[in-house]
Image (spheres, grey):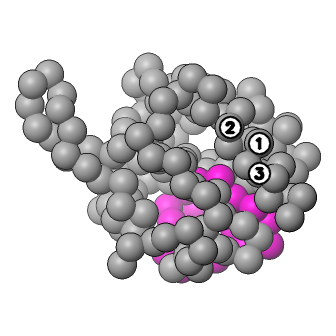
Amino acid sequence: MTLKTGDKLPDIELHLTGDRSTSLSEFSGKPLVLYFYPKASTPGCTQEGLDFSEAINKFRRQSCRILGASRDSLKAQENFKAKQGFPFDLVSDPDETLCQAFEVIKMKNMYGKKVRGIERSTFLIDASGTLQREWRGVKVKGHVEEVLDAVKALARD
């Protein structure tokens, strides 16, 4: 299944930091920013999480929630969240169910080798659970501001 802008999200089970199980549908009722990053505790992923953390109150003023997701183990996600003090939950998706639904797994070049990995991507889901915006191949610098602008525009619609 390929999700496209305007599609309703499938109800996928999520394993969140705090060792909580939930599903995507539990996040309906308010906008949600779901961002995927390649690997916990790496420089770009840390910066992206810190950027979202720094802007958390601006997102909250729009009643918007944030979730970060990667293929890392729950333990790695717990450590990453605790070390960086992220004020939002992280999703552990080692079986790639969530990653595959959003088609963020790509072949990438790493030190001259082809490897399967997450392409840094962000998705904006509205309060009814409909995919409104997507950003793929994200560059960290300035990204959070662009996402926040889209959340504000969604609130005006």
* Amino acid bearing label 2: Glu
Residue to which mark 1 is pinned: 149
Q: Position of residue 7 (x, y in %)?
A: 56, 77
Drawn side of residue 122 relative to residue 44, left or right: right
User: Rounded to the nearest whole Å, what is the CA distance between mark 3 and mark 2?
Assistant: 9 Å
Q: Based on the displayed image, in which of its 4 quarters is residue 124 positioned?
A: bottom right
For marks 3 and 2 on the same chain, the one whose residue lies earlier in the sequence: 2
Drawn side of residue 37 relative to residue 7, left or right: left
Q: Is 141 part of what is drawn in magenta?
A: no
User: Rounded to the nearest whole Å, what is the CA distance between mark 3 and mark 1?
Assistant: 5 Å
Residue to which mark 3 is pinned: 151
Residue 116 in view (yes/no): yes
Residue 35, placed above or below residue 11 = above
Q: Position of residue 108 (x, y in %)?
A: 21, 39
Q: Are marks 3 and 1 in contact (CB under 8 Å)?
A: yes
Residue depicted at x 91% and y 46%? 61
Q: Are marks 1 and 2 in contact (CB under 8 Å)?
A: yes
* Amino acid bearing label 3: Val
Drawn side of residue 92 relative to residue 20, left or right: left
Q: Position of residue 8 (x, y in %)?
A: 59, 79
Residue depicted at x 89% and y 58%? 156
Residue to which mark 2 is pinned: 146
Q: Secondary structure at mark 1?
A: helix
Image quadrant containing the N terminus: bottom left
Q: Secondary structure at mark 3?
A: helix
Image quadrant containing the C terminus: bottom right
**Residues drawn in magenta:** 11-34
Drawn side of residue 116 relative to residue 136, left or right: left
User: Rounded to the nearest whole Å, what is the CA distance between mark 1 and mark 2?
Assistant: 5 Å
Q: Secondary structure at mark 2?
A: helix
Residue 99, placed above or below residue 3 = above
